[in-house]
Image (cartoon, helix red, strand yellow):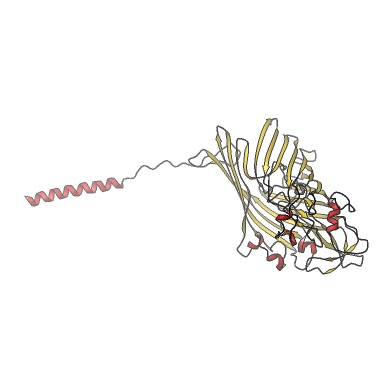
Amino acid sequence: MKVIKSLVLGSAAGLIAMSGAQAADLPVKAKAVEYVRICSLYGAGFFYIPGTDTCIKLGGYVRVDTTFNGNTYGGPAWSGDLGQQNRYRDYFSSRSRMALTIDTRTATEYGVVRTFGQGDFQFNNFGGSTSNPTALATFDANRLSTAGGGYVAVEMVFIQFAGFTFGKSASAYATPWNGYPGNNNSFLMGGADYVTGVNNIQYTAQFGNGVSATIGLDDPTVFNRTAVLNLGVAGGATSAGANAYGGTHVPDIVGNIRVDQAWGLFQVSGMAHLVNASYNILGAGGVPNALSEISGHPEDKWGGAVMAALQIKNLPTGAGDDLKIDVSYSKGATKAVISTSGASPNFVMFGGSGNGAYQSIGFGQTADAVYVPGGELKLVDAWGVRGAFNHNWDPYWSSSLWGSYSQVRYGGSVLDVTSAKGAWCANYSVGKGAGFTCNPDYSVAQVGLTTRWTPVKNLTFSAEVGAFFLDQKMSGVANLTAAAPKPTTVYEFKDQSTVFLNVRAQRNF
């Protein structure tokens, strides 16, 4: 009897265990799959981040550039080994880039909250268009362009909320096209170019009918300072003094008033920029020494710039044709005129000579101000104009004719050593030869043509040819110690020019 009872109880227990195991194996009802939903609030390409009310758009481009007789992105041969046309220069330079953009937007009771960022993954060949071991010894982004290397550049990173913008974005001073009214290259002089962004805080007010106004504070440390020349420091064959900018004391104060209409755009911009020097006494190259702090410094001075910009759309020459132009004037803020998407250039170019000299030379030193130790800052003036006419031949072909003209002026007279020009020339110590006259003023002019072919949507092949002209104001001959590999010998001061060709393939996505 006990045996039968044990068998019955064991069988029951086994059945219960089996039923429990089967119940555990039954499928659990899965949560509903949340598919990506299109967000139509902010235009094409946006979708909702799953589980949120935030819309996101991913985009960017892949771009391949090659420039002949110039630097990356169509930089003219206006300085360095390219300007010297020596054996270290590279005859061509190329860059491959993939830009990725992330744009998020969320509707709130305060309006849309937006974040935006762009990172450029890129590779440059040839170390910045030179194989000079002196240049290659200096670390910069190009040194990362080894085989299998490359680097990431950050352009825009900002937050927008209730009319405010915080982060790295285009300055309120800039035009919508920055330094690109129709050109591909990043080196069109004549106005400011904030296309890669600057750290700032700004507020935009909309007044209706396309009228708006923006005021902002820009950090000038990286972008909007050229040089403050301490003329108590010995210069060189193509410069006077040494850069003696002090630390950043206050941000640039910038703003604009803008009108956007169907016919085009009109904008007026202004900037206030503080110019401040470090010390009166500095060592070679502007390096401080034990006497610097006790030597004092010149008082800070406010400079600034103004700009007017105009775009005219719907020209009778063709559908989508337009004309863009902007005019700028600066005093103590030369980057507002002599500007690239990076640093402001100093121009040093060599050419042939028929005046008994070894070669000819032309140069232009870019500065915001000059001073003699114990004296006051003398602000440098500059003005420029640039623009482009953009024409569509048909849905597949388009061209842009672009150009610019700029002047940099050191005020006063060569004979007045208390003026910027007189003080600069008093510092410029070279072996003066026949017919030598000193004048640091210079002008630059540029003209070019860009033609594009778009065989399919968002894929464009383009070619750009450009010419650059340096009109320097020195004259005669002088014995100069030029940068190696140039010899120390007699050179003739003469205007210079150069041309470049850039070809590009770009796919937007």
Measuring 16% from the left and 49% from the top, which residue is drawn there? 11
Q: Position of residue 104 (x, y in %)?
A: 57, 42
Measuring 69% from the left and 43% from the top, which residue is drawn there? 171
Is residue 194 left or right of 401 when viewed as pictured?
left
Residue 282 visible in the shown view: yes
**In which quarter of the view is residue 242 placed?**
bottom right
Is residue 474 left or right of 163 when viewed as pictured?
right
Is residue 168 left or right of 239 when viewed as pictured?
left
Q: Position of residue 471 (x, y in %)?
A: 86, 54
- Residue sitting at the far left: 1
- Residue sitting at the far top: 208
Q: Position of residue 202 (x, y in %)?
A: 65, 39
Pick the residue in front: 144 or 124: 144
Residue 131 visible in the shown view: no
Q: Is residue 271 above or below residue 286?
A: above
Pick the residue in front: 25 or 186: 186
**In which quarter of the view is residue 114 placed?**
top right
- Residue sitting at the far right: 435
Q: Position of residue 198 (x, y in %)?
A: 66, 47
**In which quarter of the view is residue 477 placed?**
bottom right
